[in-house]
Image: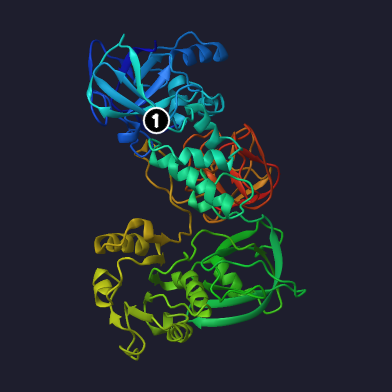
Amino acid sequence: MARLLSVNVGLPRDIAWKGRTVHTGIWKDPVQGRCKVGRLNLAGDGQGDLAGHGGEMRAVFVYQIESYRHWQDQLQRTDFVHGQFGENFTIEGLPDDTVCIGDRYRIGSALFEVTQPRVTCYRVGIRVREPRMPALLTSSGRPGFYFRVLAEGEVGAGDAIVKVGEADERMTVAGINALLYSSEHPRDRLERALRIGALSPGWRWSFEALLKGQANGSVGGNAGLAPASAAHPVAPGFRRLAIAAIDRESADVLSLSMRDPDGRLLPPAQPGQYVVLRLRPAGDGPPLLRSYSLSGPPSTERHRISVKIEPNGTAGAYLRDHVRTGDIIDVSTPRGNFLLQPGERPVVLLSAGIGATPVLAMLSALAEARSTRRILWLHAARDKQHHPFAAEVRRLIGALPQGRLYVCYSRPGPHDRMGEDFDAAGHLSRSAFDAVSMPREADVYICGPNRFMTDMKVALTAYGVAPERQYLEMFNGGEQLNPGIVGAAPRAPHPPAGDSDTGPMISFARSGVAAHWNASAYQNILELAEACDVPVRWSCRTGVCHNCESGLISGTVAYGPQPLDTPPEGNLLICCSQPTGDIVIDL
């Protein structure tokens, strides 16, 4: 009979790691005597990162002594102690290839249910002093599993583990683990997994995403793991396009229309996507990379971008002063996940300044489709002189049966007419939502300066718009995910200290930073990005979780270690890849 060998608890602590401070609850120590089991935790236990660990469905982590022996042999270690893998229960028996999701067990006076395999992260590597540990646990089929507490009680070392029930659909912990993390995702097994009522919501979402990806005909990659920022991969590489027209939209905005010089069709773009321009203002010097939203109507004949000319903006000034009709420039395939969602819900476009460009493309698509959805555009500008696309937007809004425009000028000029050029003086705020009776059930698309988007998200949430219906487009980097890292002040992206003049050039397009690859200084592209303070997302750092999956705009990479499931063409995992030449990454 299976039995409980040790009950281990520990509160989160701060530790030093690679020059940073990590807040983690991975250190667990055995309890002497009996221990109370609550719905969310054992007495005296805690998790440092509640986004990745803990909660009702992950209240108790379980690991087997048999797996301890396996790792002692594989790693040639003899120093393991109970709690070494961050587990609350060290047990004998119940291997991962036998225990099924939904199995129920009584231990002491408490009742438990198996909900999911463990999701490994870099912190178990810190605790075991083996950085490869997240990948090893997952690839070996020995991840361990989580318990949900069905009935609170007390447990203690030596207690028998008695099986008292099981799910109708029998899928083991190891089988569920492989279904998500390996490269094989059979549809019938995904459907079986989703019939298990005890399966935790996070794993359920991943399997639903895999099924949806298969239904949409996606090829390669892992839709169950890829972050939203990498969910729409496109082939890497630049295409040479000719400038077909240059139009001034306002005092500080120019539009450039581009076409194939040989008349070939352009790749279709979804409303809200952007392209990356590779400019060479210094001739043979390093290229200048900039991302610009497509601002025109859907077309495979022309792509239009609109550029704000900033006082110290190198790219904008170069395009204004040196690029002329007929010139050839390098342009990437349209990419991005800031996309107009299908359906019949109302649409709210919320923009400031040059942030109008991607939502203008959305409005153009809605007008072309003669959408009957309720469509509301709220835009903030300084004054009429700095209000691009004003006439174009009013024409498009007028063509929509339920379209409405609301414009705020923060500093209207003496000749700007309220009621004709703009609707209110000041900044967009919660009061504007009330003034236009914004529908709370709408999908809201937000683009503008970072401070504007932050303020709008706060105002929208207070107004009652659900966070999952708020879509943001972020340039100049993106949202970070560095679980457990605390006390790190954000810094603007910059070239790394001691950057050399040799080696492949690694360009981070959104952050506007480029550096040479130095294989002796960095094990992977993630480490170079961190040295440049480029905003990055990661968790496992060993090619398992795909949180670091990013767009590969151009170039190729090699993997070491090899990820468990490789990303699709056009994406890369920066935590375990190295460049094979010059590359451009969508970070």
Q: Which residue is most to the front? A: 168
- The part of the image, by quadrant, that contains residue 201 is top left
Identify which amino acid the numbered label 1 is placed on. Answer: Gly
In the rendered view, how is the structure colored?
A: rainbow
Residue nearer the viewer, 272 or 355:
272
In the rendered image of this protein, does residue 197 appear above or below residue 66?
below
What x and y, as percent, mark residue 124? 44, 26
Q: Would you place residue 280 above or below residue 424 in this image?
A: above
Residue 309 is at least partly visible in this image:
no
- Residue 433, percent from left and from top: 27, 72
x and y percentages locating residue 523 in the rendered image:
59, 33
Between 511 and 572, the one lying in front of the other is 572
At x 66% / y 55%, what residue is drawn? 235
Residue occupying the point 28% across, 77% down: 436
Determine whether, in the image, residue 511 is placed left or right of residue 420: right
Packing grade of label 1 (10 A; few <14, some 14-19, many >=20) is many
What is the quadrant of the N terminus in the image?
top left
Q: How many labels does the image show?
A: 1
Question: Relative to residue 489, is residue 512 depicted above or below?
Answer: below
Q: Which residue lies furthest to the right in this view?
A: 262
Q: Residue at (42%, 80%) from the top-left corner?
A: 387
Q: Looking at the image, is 155 positioned above or below residue 568?
A: above
Q: Which percent across, then down, holds residue 340?
A: 48, 66
Nearer the observer, 499 or 567: 567
Work out whether residue 576 can be spotted: yes
Residue that carries the numbered disc 1 in the rendered image: 102
- Residue 85 vs residue 215: left or right? left
Quarter of the image for residue 117 reads top left
Q: What element carries label 1?
A: loop
Q: For this rendering, which residue is in front, 220 or 483? A: 220
